[in-house]
Image: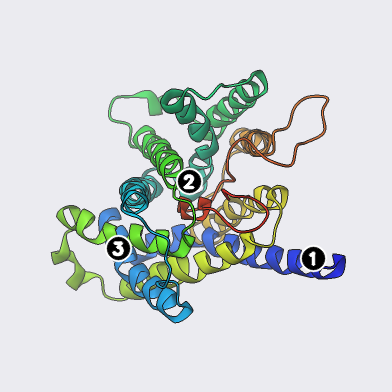
Amino acid sequence: MSTSETTRQESRGAMELTAAMLLSGTLGVFVVESGASPFNVVFYRCVFGTLFLGLYCLARGFFKNHGFTPKKLGLAALGGVFIVFNWAFLFESYSTTSISVATVVYHTQPFFVVLLGAVLFKDRITAHKAGWLLVAFLGLILVAGVSTSDLSAGSAYLTGLGYALLAALFYGLSTIITKRVTGVKPHLVALVQVLLGIPLLLPFTQLGESADIGSGWAWLVGLGFIHTGVMYVLMYSSYQKLPTSKIAVLAFVYPAAAMICDWAVYGHHVSLLQALGIPLIVAASLGINLGWRPGRRPVAAPAATPTAPTTPAEQVSAPRKRTTV
């Protein structure tokens, strides 16, 4: 491929990923405006997401030579267990903190991936990784913005922060598992995960509430078709065209867009002290993803996978650039 063609491909990939991240930024608004409980939201997201991804995979012929083996299918399904509960806890955190705070706290995902790798697979945490983890922790303390009143027993705000961290932990577990499903289209892995979510979440879903959703159905359909369909297609397409460094940087369009939406729609904004923690988390995430070391040039291949907004299915192997994006 010529240099000019590569440049055009990267430019197109950058536009696709930017569009996907901007769509991700509206996720919280769709969840809140639906008026449904978190588990109901995730359940219907899985229903409509399965419909979209199933038709898309059928139209693209992905079911032929799909690459699944019983082991890969089992790993994809196990990753799906964690990803659907990750959504439920993230959506729960919106109501007790705010979309802005929950989204930024949720972006501690890469650090959970590093820590889980050390605990589960004895991966070594190098000095520079430990340093970035410390930076991220300091940023998290600032962003959390916990006051003295929040420390009282039964604080809903502290519970919301816990939900966001638990969502990030579940995302990390799903990433660790799903990244081992190689040679399968990420669309198919995502399809397996949302399809599994339907029976998995059914016991936690209050279907009787569905009759009272009213106009909220439009928001739920949007979550399935836009945020679990169009957004994933844009992301997976862009990952084939972009180097890791651009993917890692553009991923932060998501929290920025989420904060703008939260402010524009609900009037929520972070305090000055909380705002000081955001660049610390951003810098630490990029440092982990891109292997930044003090006094050294960034390396091309990161030790951890780039942060993604809602599912680790895109970590599945891709034919270009990297094998685990």
In the rendered picture of this protein, how many numbered marks are placed on residues? 3
Which badge, 3 or 2, comes first in the chain's sequence?
2
Residue 195, numbered label = 3
Which sits in the foreground, 80 or 264?
80
Distance from Cα at disc 2 to Cα at disc 1: 26 Å
Can residue 220 be seen by looking at this rendering?
A: no
Asked if labels 2 and 3 touch by Cβ distance under 8 angstroms, the answer is no
Which sits in the foreground, 170 or 220?
170
Residue of label 2: 179
Residue at image location 66% in from the left, 47% down from the top = 248
Q: Residues within 10 Å of mark 2 (few under 14, many from 20)?
A: many
Residue 319, numbered label = none
Asked if labels 3 and 1 touch by Cβ distance under 8 angstroms, the answer is no
Distance from Cα at disc 3 to Cα at disc 2: 19 Å
Q: Where's residue 69, x and y in %?
A: 35, 55
The amino acid marked with disc number 1 is Thr
The amino acid marked with disc number 3 is Leu
Closer to the observer: label 3 or label 2? 2
Which badge, 1 or 3, comes first in the chain's sequence?
1
Q: Residues within 10 Å of mark 1 (few under 14, many from 20)?
A: few
Residue of label 1: 6
Residue at image location 28% in from the left, 57% down from the top = 197
The amino acid marked with disc number 2 is Lys
Which sits in the foreground, 313 or 121?
121
Q: Where's residue 227, x and y in %?
A: 46, 65
Distance from Cα at disc 1 to Cα at disc 3: 36 Å
Residue at image location 33% in from the left, 32% down from the top = 155
Q: Where's residue 66, x and y in %?
A: 42, 66
- Image quadrant where residue 38 sits: bottom left
